[in-house]
Image: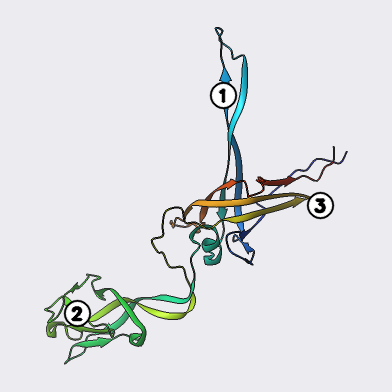
Amino acid sequence: MTTPLDAFGPGVLIVTRTDVANATPVNIGYAQEFQPEFSATIKELYGQNQFPLDAARGTVKVTGKIKAAVLSGIAWNNVFFGQTTTTGGIKWNYQEAAAIPATPYQVTVVNSATFDKDLGVTFAATGLPLVKVASAPATGQYSVSGAGVYTFAAADTTLGVLITYTSTVTTGQTIPLTNQLLGTSPTFQLDYYTTRNNKALVARFNQCQANKIAFASKLEDFIMPEFDIAMFADSSGSVGKIVFPEVA
């Protein structure tokens, strides 16, 4: 009999879509935690006495919780969204500084050629927000065109402003969040591996679905996305396997 396994650390998690052909295995993103849980219902048979005469196990639910250390769009899409991703996306241009010039009291933002959406303007000196209007702004107001041209009031000439807006980019990856039919979700195989003292613990869950992705941003801490998943049997009736290093 070999020495039993003692494990340490979160291990490695790989997901592979099972609802599409030739899916590429994807690392979930430097796993911080992995907690699978097997939970069964027990039905007791009672007679006239206090304690049950018999008990039988009913349905078994297999769930899991994953916490990752990095933000991976590829992993999120494979685990939860199952969308067709696109290259590119939007870029934040946060508080781009400018001074309101004389006639025509307009500022063209740096990324006007790829301008996307206005996200507000504040006065640089006071931090007070300007009010957006459709046209002909008065003091303390502004309007903006779809070409990224901001127009201000004549009375605000020479004042400094901070403009926040988005522009489109051709780098990165976008997951479109579309309103799909009920029951639509990606399925995936989950493979888990951890080792200590040259002894490995390996687990595979053949069919999984995620029912939650959450990520929290907070002061003085990293964003670590969390996934809740459910495991179920594949078409052959197999849920998966857990492989231990010892042989009894």
**Residue 24, quarter of picture:** bottom right
Read off the residue under disc 1. Answer: 43
On screen, residue 110 versus residue 64, left or right, reads left
Determine the residue positioned at 63% across, 54% down.
190
Q: Are marks 2 and 3 in contact (CB under 8 Å)?
A: no
Q: Disc 1 marks which amino acid?
A: Lys
Read off the residue under disc 3. Answer: 198
Give the camera-side residue of 245 and 225.
245
Judged from the image, the secondary structure of the residue bearing numbered disc 3 is loop
Q: Nearer the viewer, mark 2 or mark 1?
A: 1
Q: Residue furthest right?
A: 1
Q: Nearer the viewer, mark 3 or mark 1?
A: 1
In primary-sequence order, the first of circles 2 and 1 is: 1
Q: Disc 2 marks which amino acid?
A: Ser
Judged from the image, the secondary structure of the residue bearing numbered disc 2 is strand
Read off the residue under disc 2. Answer: 143
Quadrant where the N terminus is found in the figure = top right
Q: Residue furthest top?
A: 48
Residue 205 x %, y %:
65, 49
